[in-house]
Image (spheres, rainbow, N blue to C red):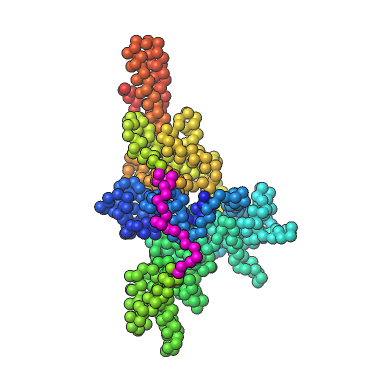
């Protein structure tokens, strides 16, 4: 067995475009990629790969899923063999054994640490608006910097009180354990039974979100002048946080990055905030640390194009040369923009809007290799030794680029720029490439066999008979059963896509005094329920069960897992070990799966691809009850049909008593049918 932490790491690291590209030639089309499907005789590209969702899908034969399931199908491997295949591809160590009791405790601790971080995020944020010190110090700081409230709330910014243990005291009062508070890094101290203290006291707080939106760490900026204290303090590395695998702002930027097909890289938290406020959302921050391979691969999931923004001073120019080689090595197209002297991304963005900012970028961005060559040329002057060093430096960077066509273009451009024979540069680049190849392929003492080297050992996934597909399950169904199956499928789609979304929440307009002004705000006066909770309650109270075994399994697992507030149905089912479930989830998450025309008509809206997705998201309060009612209606119609068949048999046998009982039962069912039809706004026509 592979432990959960390793599986999560493989799932997060494996990039669908990269994995599929090993077997399929892909071409970019909009924000996605397309190619010929490897699973059927495809003459026109019908295989779509979505880097933002990290899934693939063939809209002709229906095959698809995550990177794991693509490898399972293409290489005929079991789930765990596919995990090992991808682990080898991305150099991830696989621990294949049963979890010990200690590891199970550690897994539980990880979940508890996320819960604590979630509490801390809410606690710090609320202080900005409810505590006198939070309002006068923390909130005032953000306002002084010019940040609007929508930006403060979007990034869930906060403030930690000056008091030595205000946060830790409140957390322990609510039952959070001191040991876990220390492990998250929110509090420090406690050595030799000594007192603990809040790590971020007297600082404004910047929560760091994972790609899925969980708060994994915090950054804190001190506001008072203190020579002996660092300006910024960040959460230490922990069981749930590794700074080399997180990028500040990526959770909020990923959609914009895909849309713009470009990512801006800046250095600090406030750089990200100011750019968002200026209307530029495709921006992430390295939080003042050098870029790592893990961070770059996160970005590459969404775009191949990176523009790095730096201060226009000497320190900024020096910083521009550090770490960018790693971007080139990972195959990104890298450009550099040096801002006007005395400006940083934060200050510059606050003076711009999206249009003027993007115009400045377009006018001033320079390809990294050219930028590096021009910068070093200005330093070498006529010194031949320095010039030789410059050429070696440029060659080292070019040799890192994995794409041979790009390398040749850069060689040609650099030869012209440096006034050197192109053949000499080619020889130098080839020499470095050969050296790297030898290093990669140097024999080691242990060798892991590739999947192709292993014997054709049958696995559970390949040797056992496959369960019938959804289409096969429909064969032989009556029209009424097929209708029930279609409605059940629609319910499961809502659960996979929106399972933990709250519906039926009730808000009221209430007046609030803001300074001298009275403003109206929406206040939650009645807590709603999640989609999963409502569907479970609505079907259970009428004793309606999901009849399709596959859908029933998804429904049961969703209800069980929904007890965990962090449950993400889309991710859970898309990466499910059952290939049928993961395929179905992938199909249901696809943009091609649009709101039905019937439901669009019921909402009084025109049905088209543009408004369908948004309409569905905003109409769950109407759609979910309607769909469960449709299921009840179809179930009743099926029951009426069964009773009618029994009546005919009873009449045929001249069984008067049975006929009368069945007629009474039919009458009751028809009354229920009328009620349901009225709820659905249908006209009741009872013909059998």
Question: Residue 617: x and y, percent?
Answer: 42, 45
Q: Residue at x 65, y 57 (%)?
A: 182
| Residue range highlighted in magenta | 442-463
Q: Residue at x 42, y 80 (%)?
A: 392
Q: Nearer the viewer, residue 306 or 426?
A: 426
Quadrant assignment, res 371: bottom left
| Image quadrant in which the C terminus is located | top left
Q: Nearer the viewer, residue 423 or 232?
A: 423
Residue sitting farthest toward the front = 455
**Residue 510 appearing in the image:** no
| Residue 188 part of the magenta segment | no
Q: Is residue 33 above or below residue 264?
A: above
| Residue 450 part of the magenta segment | yes
Question: Residue 550: x and y, percent?
Answer: 42, 38
Question: Residue 84: x and y, percent?
Answer: 46, 55
Question: Residue 26: x and y, percent?
Answer: 33, 58
Q: How many marks?
A: 0
Relative horizontal placement of residue 352, taking residue 195 as reference (left or right):
left
Q: Residue at x 55, y 42 (%)?
A: 563
**Residue 536 appearing in the image:** yes
Q: Nearer the viewer, residue 31 or 418?
A: 418
Relative horizontal placement of residue 493, taking residue 145 as reference (left or right):
left
Quadrant assignment, res 367: bottom left
Quadrant assignment, res 228: bottom right
Q: Residue at x 40, y 26 (%)?
A: 636
């Amino acid at each position: 067995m592979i432990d959960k932490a390793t599986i999560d790491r493989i799932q997060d690291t494996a990039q669908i475009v990269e994995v599929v590209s090993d077997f399929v030639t892909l071409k970019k089309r909009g924000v996605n990629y397309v190619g010929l499907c490897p699973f059927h005789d495809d003459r026109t590209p019908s295989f779509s790969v979505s880097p933002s969702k990290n899934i693939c899908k063939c809209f002709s034969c229906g095959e698809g899923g995550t990177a794991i399931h693509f490898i399972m199908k293409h290489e005929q491997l079991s789930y765990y063999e596919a995990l090992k295949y991808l682990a080898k591809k991305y150099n991830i160590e696989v621990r294949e054994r049963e979890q010990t009791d200690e590891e199970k405790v550690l897994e539980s601790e990880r979940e508890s640490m996320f819960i604590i971080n979630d509490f801390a995020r809410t606690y710090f944020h609320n202080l900005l608006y409810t505590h006198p010190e939070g309002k006068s110090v923390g909130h005032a700081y953000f306002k002084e910097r010019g940040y609007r409230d929508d930006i403060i709330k979007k990034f869930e910014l906060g403030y930690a009180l000056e008091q030595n243990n205000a946060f830790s005291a409140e957390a322990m009062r609510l039952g959070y354990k001191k040991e876990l508070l220390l492990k998250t890094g929110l509090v420090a101290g406690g050595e030799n039974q000594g007192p603990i203290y809040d790590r971020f006291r007297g600082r404004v707080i910047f929560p760091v979100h994972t790609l899925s939106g969980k708060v994994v760490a915090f950054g804190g900026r001190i506001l008072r002048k203190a020579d002996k204290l660092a300006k910024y303090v960040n959460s230490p590395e922990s069981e749930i946080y590794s700074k080399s695998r997180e990028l500040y702002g990526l959770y909020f930027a990923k959609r914009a990055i895909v849309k713009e097909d470009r990512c801006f890289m800046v250095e600090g938290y406030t750089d990200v905030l100011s750019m968002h406020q200026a209307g530029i959302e495709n921006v992430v921050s390295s939080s003042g640390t050098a870029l790592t391979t893990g961070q770059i691969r996160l970005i590459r999931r969404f775009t191949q194009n990176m523009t790095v923004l730096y201060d226009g001073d000497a320190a900024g120019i020096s910083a521009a040369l550090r770490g960018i080689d790693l971007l080139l090595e990972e195959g990104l197209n890298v450009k550099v923009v040096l801002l006007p002297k005395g400006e940083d991304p934060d200050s510059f963005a606050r003076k711009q809007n999206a249009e003027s900012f993007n115009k400045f970028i377009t006018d001033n961005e320079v390809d990294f290799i050219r930028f590096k060559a021009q910068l070093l040329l200005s330093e070498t002057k006529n010194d031949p030794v320095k010039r030789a060093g410059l050429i070696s430096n440029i060659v080292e960077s070019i040799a890192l680029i994995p794409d041979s066509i790009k390398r040749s273009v850069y060689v040609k451009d650099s030869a012209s720029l440096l006034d050197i024979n192109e053949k000499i540069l080619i020889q130098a680049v080839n020499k470095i490439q050969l050296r790297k190849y030898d290093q990669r392929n140097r024999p080691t003492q242990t060798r892991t066999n590739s999947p192709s080297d292993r014997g054709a050992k049958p696995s559970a996934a390949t040797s056992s008979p496959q369960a019938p597909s959804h289409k096969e399950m429909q064969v032989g169904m009556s029209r009424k059963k097929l209708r029930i199956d279609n409605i059940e499928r629609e319910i499961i789609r809502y659960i996979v896509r929106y399972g933990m979304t709250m519906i039926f929440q009730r808000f009221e307009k209430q007046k609030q005094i803001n300074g001298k002004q009275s403003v109206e705000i929406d206040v939650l006066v009645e807590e709603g329920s999640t989609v999963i909770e409502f569907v479970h309650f609505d079907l259970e109270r009428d004793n309606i069960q999901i009849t399709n075994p596959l859908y029933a399994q998804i429904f049961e697992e969703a209800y069980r897992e929904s007890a965990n507030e962090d449950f993400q149905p889309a991710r859970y089912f898309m990466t499910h070990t059952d290939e049928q479930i993961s395929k179905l989830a992938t199909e249901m998450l696809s943009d091609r799966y649009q709101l039905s025309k019937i439901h669009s008509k019921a909402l009084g809206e025109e049905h088209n691809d543009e408004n369908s997705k948004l309409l569905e998201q905003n109409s769950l309060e109407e759609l979910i009850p309607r769909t469960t009612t449709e299921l009840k209606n179809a179930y009743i119609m099926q029951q009426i049909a069964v009773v009618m068949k029994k009546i005919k048999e009873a009449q045929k046998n001249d069984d008067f008593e049975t006929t009368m009982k069945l007629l009474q039962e039919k009458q009751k069912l028809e009354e229920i049918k009328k009620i349901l039809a009225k709820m659905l706004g249908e006209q009741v026509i009872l013909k059998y």
